[in-house]
Amino acid sequence: MSVAADFSVEACRERIARWQPRINAFNRLENTPLGGGAGPLAGVPLAHKDMFYRAGQVSNCGSKIRRGWVASETSTALERLDAAGALQIGTLNMAEFAYGPTGHNEHWGDCCNPWNPDYITGGSSSGSGAAVAARLVFGALGSDTGGSVRIPAAACGVTGLNTTWGRVSRAGAMPLSHSLDTVGPLAGSAEDCARILQVIAGFDPKDLVSSREPVDDYLSALADKGLRVSISTSWIERNAEAEVASAVLAAARALRSAGTTLVEVEPPEFDQLSAHCITVMQSEASAQHAPWMRERPGDYSAAVRARLEAGFAVPAAAYLEALRLRGAWLERFCSRTLSDADLYLLPAMNVRVPTREQTGARGGAGMPKLLAEVSRLTRWVNYLGVPALVLPCGFDSNGLPIGLQLVARPFAEATLLRAGHGLQRATDWHRRVPPG
Amino acid sequence: MNSWNPEAVEAALASQGIRLAPGRAAKIAAALNASAGLADPLLGSLAFETDPTAYALALSRCSAK
């Protein structure tokens, strides 16, 4: 592909110098870009969440505990981007150990929303969302365990893809919850996400849950038409804030005008599925962190330590019950919600983007409930292990983006990207750039 | 039924070598009690033989291909 002058390394560096003091998206900027060469992403400047390992380079994982830790291997996703000619120009801020939905980080400083720094970027791929929104890079890798690609994409007004569990290798990426972790791209459009996904998707013997399902031609699939999309309109009207519901339903109408058939369905059991996601995530994350939680609990932020503590109290039987039920819930979603449709459409978040104060340590009595709302509509997707695309569909009265979410059957990333591309041909929300 | 209390949580985590931050035991006990009575509606129909690996088969069956 040819890279527009807007995304030359020099232009990106100039914008980073301007934006970094305001949004704190980068942890490190490379003097000489890493990777590069010939390939489908030749010369394309990217930066990635600071948890994708590169041999000989530091991966801090947004933490104090791993500050300065040098990786001995390179993640498969970065190897594939390198082989495709992409340039890595830096590493991006993230929530501590990818365990937080807002973008707060007391060790590395909060990442701030480019549309208004008082507001959250969403997390845990906070720097990925902010950097892509401010057009500091063409695209970025994030990870998604309960919404960590999609929440930043929604809050920052960019396009983010949560991939099917096993579609993209997690080898050499920091683990949070092995049953739920996925790797996916954030970029300015569905088409640009397709360009990145094309390179990173596919079987990898180094990740034992990596799938052997064939990889589609995502760019060619963008042109196809004739999708059916299910939606739960009255649920959205009852449960989402009015401005969110209005924007999401307007986007659904835009899809219909562009040739998509809308089908009304009962909503999936979001809260039941979310509860299972939390059970699995807490159990696995706490097991992963057990040695550090025993030896140096004071080196975690209070919020992450609290989340990890909770996981040690989850009964083993409850954890295994959630995993035993997972297949049955996936089959139910596909046979009911998608029985007559290719995709399911819903908001990325029911609430408007909150401020950093509302969702931080001084957020007050309403903070836990607001925090739960931020990820209420994303966690269930990770429990099912299905792919989901978030893309911008409007702005709220505070001037912050509103995100729409499309969810598909396993390995139907091509269908998601096709629907997203169709919507982005009919609207221009994805072309809006924060002033400055 | 509130089967968990802060002391029980404190003891359960201490047995795993985890020292709780102050005030956390009561919050964890409350969360455990809130979720303890919630039965999954699919549990009753789940085959006795089902184990967590059934998910991999479901993923393949439900695939878009």
Image (cartoon, coloured by chain):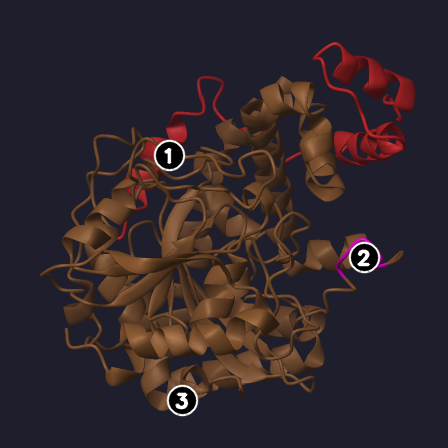
Q: Which residue is mark 2?
A: A367
- Please say whether residue A165 is one of the residues in the magenta stretch: no
Q: Judging from the image, what is the letter of the chain drawn in red?
A: B
The numbered dot on residue A427 is 3
Chain to which mark 3 belongs: A
Chain A visual colour: brown
Classify mark 3: residues with Cα within 10 Å, few (<14), some (14-19) or many (20+): some
The disc at residue A71 is: 1
| Number of residues whose C-alpha sits closer than 10 Å to that of mark 2, classed few (under 14), some (14–19) or many (20 or more) | some
Q: Nearer the viewer, residue A18 or B17?
A: A18
Specify which label sits upstream in the sequence, 2 or 1.
1
What type is the residue that disc 1 sits on? Ala
Work out how far the residue at label 1 is from the one at label 3, CA to CA, in angstroms: 42 Å
Q: Chain of mark 1?
A: A
Label 3 residue SS: loop
Q: Nearer the viewer, mark 1 or mark 3?
A: 1
User: Which span of residues is magenta-colored?
Assistant: A359-363
Callout 1: few (<14), some (14-19), or many (20+) C-alpha neighbours within 10 Å? some
User: Quarter of the image containing the N terminus of chain A?
Assistant: bottom left
